[in-house]
Image: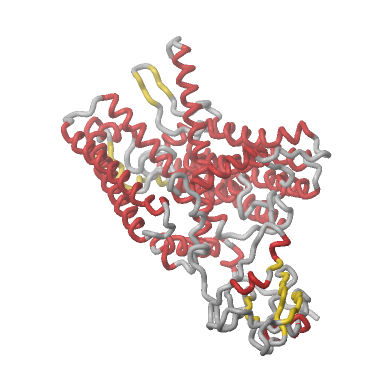
Amino acid sequence: MTGNWILDLVIIVLKAAFLLTILLTMAPVLIVLERKISAFIQDRPGPNRADIFGFRLAGFVYVLADAIKLFTKENFTPSAANRFYYYLAPAISVMVALSTGAVVPFADSLTFGEHVVPMQVLPINAGLLWFFAIASLGVYGIVFAGWASNSKYSLLGSIRSSAQLISYEIPMGLSVVGLLMAFQTLELNKIVQAQGGLLNVLNLFHAGVQIPLANGAHLALGIPNWGIFIQPVAFVIFLVASYAETNRTPFDLAESESELVAGFHTEYSAMKFGMFFFAEYMAMVVASSIMATLFFGGWQVPFLDTAALQALSLPLVRLGLGSGAGVVALAAFGLYRFYLANRGRFGDRRDLEGLVLAVVAGGLAGLLALACLGSLLLTEMPVWGAVAFAAFAQFNAFFIKMFLLATTFVWVRWTVPRFRYDQLMDLGWKSLLPLALANIFVTGLAILLGNHFGG
Amino acid sequence: MKVARPTEAIQERVYLLELVKGLGITLRHLVSNLVSPRRMPIVEYPEKQKSFPAGFRGKHRLTKRENGDVRCVACFMCATACPAECIHIVAEESPDPTIEKRPARFDIDLLECVFCGMCVEACPVDAIRMDSGVYAIADFKRSNFVITKEELMAVKPQGLPD
């Protein structure tokens, strides 16, 4: 570590800004996805009318309209509310949602000579503990909101929610213990690094074959050493507990809009409500990224570790650009067909949207194809290019995993009905807790056996 | 009396398998609707509207004679039959010597109306009908829901001609 603290500070600020950008842009994307996926699941097309200059963008305009509405609505405060805590509650919710993500690594550490830059905002060795510590503060946002509003619906919602969050934190924490026994570290980047390579079965054999590449790198074909394959039971418990922790259906008893008006945020209007709304989606993103990190290998690209990515960077860049051009060209074709199928539907500029977007996508496909041809001229990848490509590919792998898990949140919400309160408590205390304890026991047994026979 | 509780099989009590089945159903709907959005059982409402069967009772209309005069003879049968008492008629003498009376005013309060169709049944000269097919009746002022004779005569029929 050199003494150049200004550079360190700039890097930390850049990483924090990057994380905030991801979280704040993923929230509206998930809101659109929520509306569209719920619509398609229920056999209807969902929001598809509002437009800006004829661009409807599959419902994204509605999120913009929502934001304008939430910012300009009357900022109502109930007269009997405790104003300090009433205003503090949404701030706590957003703060918790934003700061839990700080420990998630979104790529392998970058090495510039002696300078190692970890790709996480808060590279501490107690990363997982930070996540649990800050995430458990989230209950204060809901409890303050319910109590300070001085409304019985809000209070009922927040009482249910606090009991629920405390109950589900125990199986959540216990489910990770098995994983920690396997990886023997709390640092999330090290956990992800340990998930590279092939699945190690009881120290006896690896589930796959290693194909050697240039520069001592390996292509690992087989089942990757991901947390979900090492600890499948822990994954199920963690998944269920994270749905409960983020207050999503089937565990959204804090909101219970069919029984408690809107639960803990009944008395909140305008952007104060908007902050709760945003915090829910950002908490989903953070929970998905933690799940991706712990159980799906985080930034690990399947079959390729960092060294292999850097060794294979040139052919992979060509492949990526080529297939990217193909996919975007297909999208352009699809958009053109969408335009043809919907001609004259509205009788205004909205009808041309498909054509304009098809032309834009076609141009993008052409640019990607040109870049692919250009990459054929390169005979050797420069070192910085290989490092940058590896980081980019790893970030994309992380992002895709996180995005799919976040979509699963939406998918589950529109499939499963809400639990009754006693069912919720039964599931947490009588099913998940014993299961998590049994999982720890079995994991310990497996590690002992592995050390005895394989070691 | 003892009511036997329905028992659940073990795979239903575990819940996880049933959950996966449910997720499969929703995923099937999601994918099939993404692949072929035209098969969704929907009507793009303001642009396209469903047509209704002949017996559908929509907004009222007053039918006309060959020469365009109102067919109504102001006999008050509809106003008498009306259970909601939403029809208000003021009669006057008709200039035509073969016809005794005609309505000077014929107001229907659509907020009072229960759309039962008794007025149509009661009318002896087929002067009032509910075959317009108009069902989305909305306005910003209560007073605009009281429709007059002229407005009733201007309503276009959906089904049979006059």
Residue B150, by quadrant, is bottom right
- Up the image or down, B46 lies above or below A384; here it is below
Q: Is residue A169 above or below residue B21?
A: above
Residue A148, given in percent of the width and then of the height, sits at 78, 38
Colouring rule applied to residues: secondary structure
Q: Quadrant of the N terminus of chain B?
A: bottom right
Looking at the rendered image, the quarter that the C terminus of chain B falls into is bottom right
Residue in view at x 76 percent, y 74 percent:
B88
List x then y, in percent, for residue B22: 53, 64
Q: Nearer the viewer, residue A43 or A75?
A: A75
In the image, taking residue B34 as reference, residue A180 lies left or right, namely: right
Residue located at (18% from left, 30% from top): A378
**Residue A168 point in image, percent of width and height:** 65, 46
Q: Is residue A448 visible?
A: no
Residue A175, x across and y down, in percent: 57, 45
Q: Nearer the viewer, residue B3 or A315?
A: A315
In the displayed structure, does residue A308 sit left or right of residue A11? left
Tell which of A34 and B128 is nearer to you: B128
Q: Is residue B27 visible?
A: yes
Side of A303 where B23 appears, left or right: right
Residue shown at 44%/36% (left/top)? Answer: A192
